[in-house]
Amino acid sequence: MDAFGESTDERDGKDTFFAKLDPSAPDHPVSTSDLALQTRRHANLRHLIQLLDAEGIQSWAVQAAVFADMTGPQLQALMEGDTISDWLAREIEWAVHRPNGWLDKQWEDRLDD
């Protein structure tokens, strides 16, 4: 088990943490609304990474440790398009002191940062 409570057994070259989140998997149909949600989550996560960069926290490993108990490669995979699950979104929000649902919203300005 990893820090996410997921099995780390190999499956098709990915651990099951990412296999479960893979939207291309046959049991994960992706709707237009799901794609819009993932787009917002990725944009907001990218913004949080930029804030950490500005603070001098620039390694994937250290940034991943700030957001949640994940590894640098897992964070990098998320930034390359892996699905950000509801559970993981809430964990990231909690870790960086954002309200529940913050990653899901489209922000016109960033005055809250």
Image (cartoon, rainbow, N blue to C red):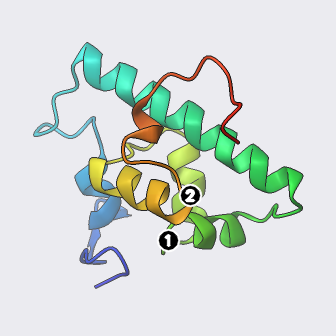
Which amino acid, mark 2?
Answer: Leu
- Count of numbered badges drawn on the protein: 2
Report the quarter where the C terminus lies: top right
Q: Quadrant of residue 28?
A: top left
> Closest to the observer: 23 or 102?
102
Dot placed on the residue nearer the N-terminal end, 1 or 2: 1
- The percent coordinates of residue 30 (x first, y second) are 22, 26
The residue carrying pointer 1 sits among few (fewer than 14), some (14 to 19) or many (20 or more) residues within 10 Å by Cα, namely some
> Closest to the observer: 19 or 84?
84
Query: Which residue has dot 2 on it?
Result: 75
Q: Residue at x 45, y 39 (%)?
A: 102
Label 1–label 2 contact, CB within 8 A = yes
Asked if residue 37 lies left or right of residue 50, the reply is left
Asked if residue 5 lies left or right of residue 90, the reply is left
The residue carrying pointer 2 sits among few (fewer than 14), some (14 to 19) or many (20 or more) residues within 10 Å by Cα, namely many
Query: Which residue has dot 1 on it?
Result: 70
- The percent coordinates of residue 9 (x first, y second) are 26, 77
Which amino acid, mark 1?
Answer: Met
Q: Residue furthest front?
A: 112
Q: Residue furthest left?
A: 27
- The percent coordinates of residue 100 (x first, y second) are 37, 47
- The percent coordinates of residue 14 (x first, y second) are 36, 62
